[in-house]
Amino acid sequence: MLGKVLKMAGCKDCKDGAPLLIAFSMAFHPIVDVIENKIWGYESLVRGLDGQGALHVLGQVDETNRYKFDQACRVRAIELAGRLFSAPDTKLSINFMPNAVYEPAACIRATLEAAHRVGFSHDQLVFEFTENERMIDVPHVQRIIAEYRRQGFLTALDDFGAGYAGLNLLASFQPDLIKLDMELIRSVSTSTSRQIIIASIVAMAKQLGVTVLAEGIETVSELDTLRAAGIRLFQGYLFAKPTFESLPPIANFDADGALSLRVA
């Protein structure tokens, strides 16, 4: 049931009994591996029950309900994905709010319970935090990521290149993935400066053992240019738009599931 009270031991916010009065569910957006020619995973995106966008829902989140909302989003995304996913290695990427996590080991319990109920292995779950979210306590976020790694989860830094602190966050946290911001990608096929910057990011990430994912892909020329730069994971409207509580049909794949786009 949406907005149900999460009853788990730990912080007072888990125990106060107040319901989460925000009605929401999830849409899913595919992430494509163009080397393996398959769907690598799906990002879960919060939506209102009548199709409202994320801002409509997030506008109802404040300091009084941030923790419960973050917990409820994780559980809802996992429960839906458990019904929709068929391949056992498909990743589920969940956006989380680092500033809403109090004690990493305690606050992950509802996530672990949901994953167990639907039969998800820990390495199927990816937790994204964004460069644009102000990090109140960097050492605390480092502890969160360390705990998630200990549990076998993957972590991703979203919107990389959009804010002022991207390199500092990468140095501090070293996530498993970085997602290049779509504004950096736009017009990359005709912009030498963008190509040089992205090539440098890819080289740096390779040395750090971090995988690069390009999001916001809309054209074949963008795909060609970025694949030639060494990127294999892609997300964007070229493949599909997010669909509410379902997995979207993927464009540009043939009957055998192989990528049929022209790529470099």
Image (cartoon, rainbow, N blue to C red):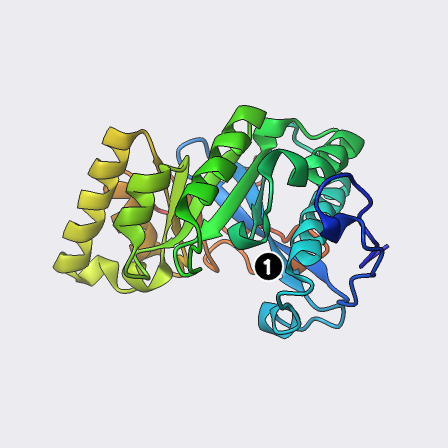
Is 168 or 196 nearer to us in this picture?
168
Residue 3: x and y, percent? 80, 59
Pick the quarter of the image with the C terminus. Answer: top left
Residue 251: x and y, percent? 53, 52
Residue 105 shown left or right of residue 98 in the figure: right
Taking the spot 14% from the left edge, 51% from the top edge, the residue there is 196
Secondary structure beneath dot 1 equals loop
Is 88 or 72 nearer to us in this picture?
72
* Residue placed furthest toward the front: 12
Asked where in the image residue 194 lies, by quadrant, the reply is bottom left
Asked if residue 61 shows in the view, the reply is yes
Is 204 or 236 nearer to us in this picture?
204
In the depicted structure, whether residue 203 falls above or below residue 193: above
Taking the spot 39% from the left edge, 33% from the top edge, the residue there is 35
Residue 48 shown left or right of residue 242 in the figure: right
Taking the spot 67% from the left edge, 36% from the top edge, the residue there is 106
The amino acid type of the residue labelled 1 equals Pro
Residue 231: x and y, percent? 32, 40
Pick the quarter of the image with the N terminus. Answer: bottom right
Is 152 or 256 nearer to us in this picture?
152
Characterize the local packing of mark 1: few (<14), some (14-19) or many (20 or more) Cα atoms within 10 angstroms.
many
Residue with the mark numbered 1: 242
In the depicted structure, whether residue 20 falls above or below residue 80: below
